[in-house]
Structure formats: structure tokens, C-alpha cells
Image (cartoon, rainbow, N blue to C red):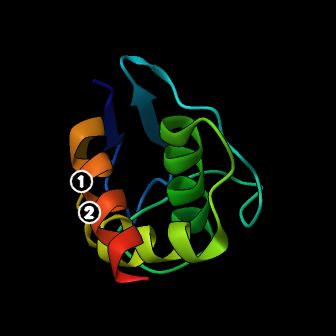
Amino acid sequence: MKIYKGKRLGPKEESSEVVVTVDGQPLKHRVRHSPTGYEWGYLGSGPSDLALSILWDFMGHEPTRADYWCFKDQFVAKWKDSWQITGEEIRHWLDTFAEAK
């Protein structure tokens, strides 16, 4: 099962440099909202692209806007400087979220 991880390389106030991986490899940035890259910990363009990229990688196809915006709201916007989420957690969320639609 896939493991997604992210970490900030310095304090948020001083550096916006972040690293995001899936199974130890860089996660492909699916650019839709933020040409400058990923972010997390708030609702914005960087977190939107991170949510989109994680779900796209996990699902193997482009997720709907409703899916990745909800994922951003429920997970990405709440993450701190360092985070991890497993494919199992994402699968559970997708199954639950799909049922709630």
C-alpha cells in the first residue's frame, strides 16, 4: 500500500521549500492551481494541488474537483510541518466520501 509523506525544510515563515513523496519518490505535481508548488496547513492553491496530486496518484486517474477539494478540507488543510497518510487511509476516505455523495 502506498505511503505519502511531506515535510517542511524550514520554518514556514522563513521558507516555503517542502518535500512530498510517495513510497520514497517525489510525487508528481499535477499543476492546476499553484504553479509554484505544494503547500499544506491552510486552504489555498498549494494545498489544492497537493490534494489533487495525491488523489490522482492513488486513484490512477484525475479525481473530480469535489473529491480533491473535500480531501483538502478534511486532511491537507489540517496537516502540520510534517505529515504522512497511507493508501489504506485514502481508500477508507474515498469509500466513505463516495457513500456520502
Q: What residue type is labelled 2?
A: Trp
Q: How crowded is mark 2: few (under 14 residues within 10 Å), some or many (20 or more)?
A: some
Q: Which amino acid does label 1 sit on?
A: His
Residue at 57% x, 67% y: name it: 48
Q: Where is residue 15 in the image (x, y as percent from the top left)?
A: 46, 53
Helix, strand or loop status at disc 2: loop
Measure the alpha-carbon separation of dots 2 and 1. Answer: 18 Å
Q: In this view, does 18 lie to the left or right of 89?
A: right
Residue at 24% x, 53% y: name it: 92
Frontmost of labels 2 and 1 is 1
Q: Are marks 2 and 1 in contact (CB under 8 Å)?
A: no
Residue at 25% x, 44% y: name it: 85
- What residue is pinned by disc 2? 79
Residue 94 against residue 78 in the figure, above or below: above
Residue lying farthest to the top in this orientation = 24
- Looking at the rendered image, the quarter that the N terminus falls into is top left
Q: Which of 3 and 98 is in front in this view?
A: 98
Q: In this view, does 45 lie to the left or right of 3?
A: right
Residue 54 against residue 95 in the figure, above or below: above
Q: Nearer the viewer, residue 57 or 13?
A: 57
- Looking at the rendered image, the quarter that the C terminus falls into is bottom left
Helix, strand or loop status at disc 1: helix
Q: How crowded is mark 1: few (under 14 residues within 10 Å), some or many (20 or more)?
A: few
Residue at 44% x, 76% y: name it: 70
Q: Where is residue 89 in the image (x, y as percent from the top left)?
A: 22, 48
Say whether disc 2 or disc 1 marks the residue closer to the N-terminus: 2
- What residue is pinned by disc 1? 92
